[in-house]
Structure formats: C-alpha cells, structure tokens
Image (cartoon, grey):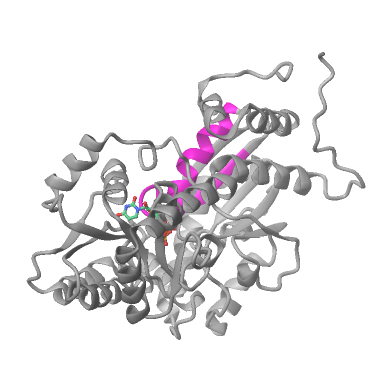
Amino acid sequence: MQCEGIQVNGLLQKYAQIVGEEVVDHLRQLAEPLRGLKVVHVNSTREGGGVAEILSWLVPLKNELGIHTEWEVVTGSQEFYQCTKGFHNALQGNRVEIPGSLLRAYEGANEENADRLRSSLEEADVVFIHDPQPAPLLRLCSGRRGKWIWRCHIDLSRPYRPVWKYLRGFVEGYDASVWSLAQFAQPLPHPLYLIAPSIDPLSEKNRELTPDEVLGVAVRFGLDPKRTAITQISRFDRFKDPVGVIRAYRLCKEYTPLQLVLAGGGATDDPEGEQVLREVRTAAGDDPHIHVLLLPADSHREINALQRFSQIVVQKSTREGFGLTVTEAMWKGKPVIGGDVGGIRLQVVNHHTGFLVNSPEGAALRIRYLLKHREHMLEMGRKARQFVRNNFLLTRHLREYLTLVHAIRHEERERIELNGLQSGL
Ligand code: UDP
C-alpha cells in the first residue's frame, strides 16, 4: 500500500527489507498528519552514549517523514558537566551532595544555552528534552507555543531524594515525560509514557560485516583470532562495573584460555571517564589477554566488529537505564551476560537470550557454562537476535514516538485517529 502524497525516498524504505513493507507503510501513515510540524530534540552530547546513538538515526528519519526535526546540544563549563555527572550518579542511587556552586553553574549554563536556542525552541511544535542536563530550558522559554516532553533515559527507580527533589522542580512543568521502564517512572503531575529504546540495524554499528572485516579489526587491536573472546563495550563508568568484569574473567581463565576486551571511549559530557579508565588499567595489570581499548567517538565499525568477534558479550552494569550495548550484541546473535538491573532485564530473558547476574562470581559461572555448552550458546544467540527483531528495532521506537506526538498534541480531543486508513484503491 502506498500513501498518497507521501514522498518516498530511500532511508526508511531500506528498513522494509528487515521489518516488512507493512511496518514501514504504517509509519508513513502515522506521520502523514504530522507533516510540516517542527520538532526539536535537545541533549548534551552528539557522540558517546545511548542518547546520541538514538538521536543520530531518529532525527534523519523524522525529517524523511516530513516532520522538520532539529537536534540541539547544550554545552557548559567543566563545573556544568561535573554537576550533571553528579546528578546522574545521584539519580541512579548514589548519595551525592552537590555543592551550591555547581548547581549555580548548572543553572547558569542553561541560561546561556537558552539565550542561544530560545527562538528555535519557542516556535517549535514539540520539544523533546533528554535527561537532566537541559531540563531547566522549559522555564527559560516562557514564550513557548508547543508541547514539551522530558525524556528520561536513566534508571530513576531509587534516586537519592534531595537531588531528585531539586530536579523535579524543573521537570514538573513539562506536558509529559517518557521513561524506558515502568519501575523508573516517578510520580509527576503530567502523563507518563513508557517507550523502550532501540537500535538501527543498518547503521555502521550494527550492519552485517564480512568475516574478513571482523578479523581485520580484531587483529588490528592485537586480539588472538584463535582464543575465545569475552567483550564488554561501555563508557568507562563505575555503574558499568568494568572492574567486576575483570574479576569474572579471572575466575574463568583458570579453567579455559580466554581473552577479555573492555572497549569504550569517553562521552563529552562525562568527566569521570579518565579516572575510571585508570582504575580499570590498574585492575588489568600486565595480563596480556586483557585488552583495554580506548576508542575514538566514531568507532562504530570497530565496536560492531568486536561484538561480532566475541563468543559472549557481557554488560555487567550495577545500574542501567536501558543498555543499548546489550541490544547491539543480541542483534549480532550473541548471548549476553548482563547485570540484573534496569533495562538489561527487559532484554535479557534469563536462560533464554542470556543470563542475568548479580556478582562477578555469577558472571563467571555463566561464562563457563556457555563455553562448555556451545550448542546452547548458539541457540541463545539465535533467540537473542529474534527477540531484538521483535522488540528493539528503530521502527517500533519511531512508531511509538509518532503516536506520542499525536496524543500530546490532541490530548483534549475525545478521539484521536491513528489508523490512517487510505482511500486510494
Ligand atoms: N558506545 C560507543 N563508543 C564507546 C562506548 C559506547 O559508540 O566507546 C556506544 C554503544 O555502542 C551504545 C551506546 O554508546 O550504542 C551506549 O549506550 P548504552 O545504553 O549501552 O549506555 P549509556 O552510555 O547510554 O549509559
């Protein structure tokens, strides 16, 4: 079925080969009444981390659907990033007292960003503000004419209350908020939507690679093509527990020859990365089979290859908003051994698409089990890929975002038409 008046160009059509024509047609139908709207997304980094990863496909696809979509990034001083990293740690449960001077830097940086972005944001029909960094922009754009949505990507199930109380003051005024998991959602005086993240199966990070491409990358990083590889890809962040992964590896390597890859770069909005990287290097010591790789921000093909090269992917986080690295590995047919937290639980169906673990010892046990039961390992990998195909590809995500925009723009109406039935037979 073809929608009348809808420009079909290449980008979206490519996904039809993976998810089917009907799914892509449905997206076009949903987007048709939204054509010409102006939507702006605001976050705090263009590279590194899951939010940037999502916006880099979401923005072009919405534009292709005729929705004028822009992506703005707020920036600030070192104190601003120190403050927002403190928020991140506190919202995910650490007891972090944030000094008043840092809070002033946070508010000041938002004022400066508001001066730069105000006219664009005030005239937009819909504004998506991602995470706490740009949250105060709403208050600073008093002439806004559109709907504003706060998109929270982090695990807010057990926040450190004083910090959440402070931030809640900035997010209460939004027209709606979006969360990855029901457990994360905090009471707020507006509608709360649940939308899980997703990956782009055709991006450089996830597209198919030839065995030679995979091998080429592995050899370039000094990996041994004959040795079993376990990999964790992550920013160097304590919540990702890279040191715990090293412990798990050490518990396994007594029984079987292994190599461990811990690969990640910094996100521009994460000031703690260097310190955590030092801790990881110290923990790795001089073990020649531990490869700590500091990757530049555009290493998408390299990450793709490392995930494909590995027999097992680990994501041993102790807090995790969603964990796109889990989705990425599962899409490549890898079983994932993941921390039993946050969005990892949504993806790793314990004993089916991988294993959920609570300690380095648990991770080691599961790694050893999978390496002993290769058939089961491959079977889990197959199920993992299917699970992502059914649930975590960008077409589902885009459909939910479009539905949300319909709902938020017409919330006073009794009836919202979402079916987009076509008359042109
Ligand atoms: N990533 C990357 N380079 C790195 C580390 C991570 O491109 O050095 C990507 C990774 O492949 C994934 C995203 O950044 O797409 C991380 O998202 P996730 O939800 O796993 O964690 P976050 O960093 O957002 O906490």
User: Of residues 4 and 47, which is closer to you in this image?
Assistant: 4
Q: Residue at x 16, y 66 (%)?
A: 257
Q: Please check the rendered image and state whether residue 48 is part of the magenta-colored stretch, yes or no.
A: yes
Q: Quadrant of ligand 1?
A: bottom left
Residue 31 located left or right of residue 240: right
Q: Is residue 365 above or below residue 58?
A: below
Q: Quadrant of the N terminus?
A: top right
Residue 281 located left or right of residue 83: left
User: Of residues 20 and 87, which is closer to you in this image?
Assistant: 20
Q: Residue at x 35, y 37 (%)?
A: 204
> Does any portion of residue 378 appear in the rendered image?
yes
Q: Is residue 237 above or below residue 100?
A: above
Q: Quadrant of the C terminus?
A: top right
Residue 192 located left or right of residue 155: right
User: Of residues 151 and 374, which is closer to you in this image?
Assistant: 374
Residue 305 placed where, x, y %?
27, 44
Q: Please check the rendered image and state whether residue 111 is part of the magenta-colored stretch, yes or no.
A: no
Q: Residue at x 72, y 33 (%)?
A: 34
Image: magenta residue range: 39-64
Outermost residue on the right side: it is 414
Residue 361 placed where, x, y %?
33, 81
